[in-house]
Amino acid sequence: MADFDSVPVEKFSLKEVLITFQSCLTDSQEIVTDSYVNGWRGLVRFMNSLGSIFSFISKDAVNKIQIMVTHRNGENGDKYETLQSMVKYELDNNLVDLQRRAEHPESGCRTLLRLHRALRWLELFLEKLRTSTEDSKTSVMCTDAYNDSLAQHHAWIIRKAATMAFCALPGRAAFFQTMNVGSTEQVVAMLGEAMPFISKVYEITEELYKQHNLLELP
Ligand SMILES: CCCCCCCC/C=C\CCCCCCCC(=O)N[C@@H](COP(=O)(O)O)[C@H](O)/C=C/CCCCCCCCCCCCC
């Protein structure tokens, strides 16, 4: 897999997200790590286009993407092909800090868990956008989605910074335009197509982490 920094910057399209999250799922309902990471890359590119106020969020997301890329490019990269094989490999080989961060602060399992929690925020935010009306505020939809998901895992200072940044989001019409998908109707249709794949990926990961008691990794 190519290094994150060497990937050329392309114009964001919601279609890209749709395709990458759709292509995450194998026939046996495993989640392909490369596609999952590529989905996040597309989203981060989009967020970068919204302004530098989001750069502290972007930096953290890029850092986590890069950790996953490093695992995939490492000598045991094949063990990280799917999230299921990653969990099995890291647990079988005691590569996950279960109680407190110690010898394995950058395990695939704990890193992916942070992105997984963010995927729940995305799922909630996209659903709010999809069902929104002309006078709905993106900042309110984003904050509500955040408070119902990621916020409970963040320190006070991060919550403050995040909610301040959300206030800088463009209004609904400008936001839809930035998505580069077409008319409002086309955006709504696209969201309707993308949502089931994102939800499915979220559900399968949640179940995988639940089965192995990994949902609270430090
Ligand atoms: C057409 C799509 C429309 C939506 C596009 C959304 C684009 C969003 C792109 C990226 C989202 C960033 C994901 C952030 C992952 C955060 C992981 C995390 O929770 N990290 C914290 C814990 O990490 P550890 O310390 O345990 O290693 C870390 O403390 C976080 C720091 C940064 C602040 C994170 C705030 C997250 C807010 C997510 C909403 C993004 C809003 C973007 C606005 C469109």
Image (cartoon, rainbow, N blue to C red):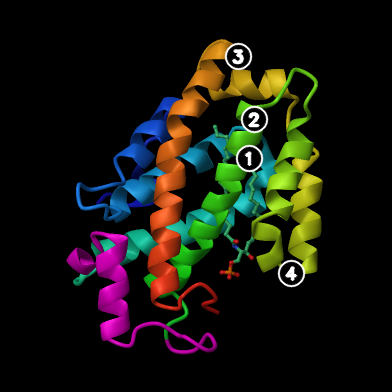
Q: Amino acid at mark 1?
A: Phe
Mark 1: is the Cβ under 8 angstroms from ligand 1? Answer: yes
Label 2 or label 4, whichever lies nearer to me, is: 2
Residue beneath disc 1: 125
Q: Amino acid at mark 3?
A: Thr
Q: Is residue 163 magenta?
A: no
In which quadrant of the rendered view does residue 125 lie?
top right
The reply to whether discs 2 and 1 touch (Cβ–Cβ < 8 Å) is yes
- Residue 106 in the image: above or below residue 157: below
Q: Earlier in the sequence, mark 3 or mark 2?
A: 2
- The stretch of residues the image draws in magenta is 77-103
Secondary structure under badge 4? loop
Residue beneath disc 3: 184
Residue 168 in percent (x, y) is at 78, 36
In which quadrant of the rendered view does residue 161 lie?
bottom right
Label 4 or label 3, whichever lies nearer to me, is: 3
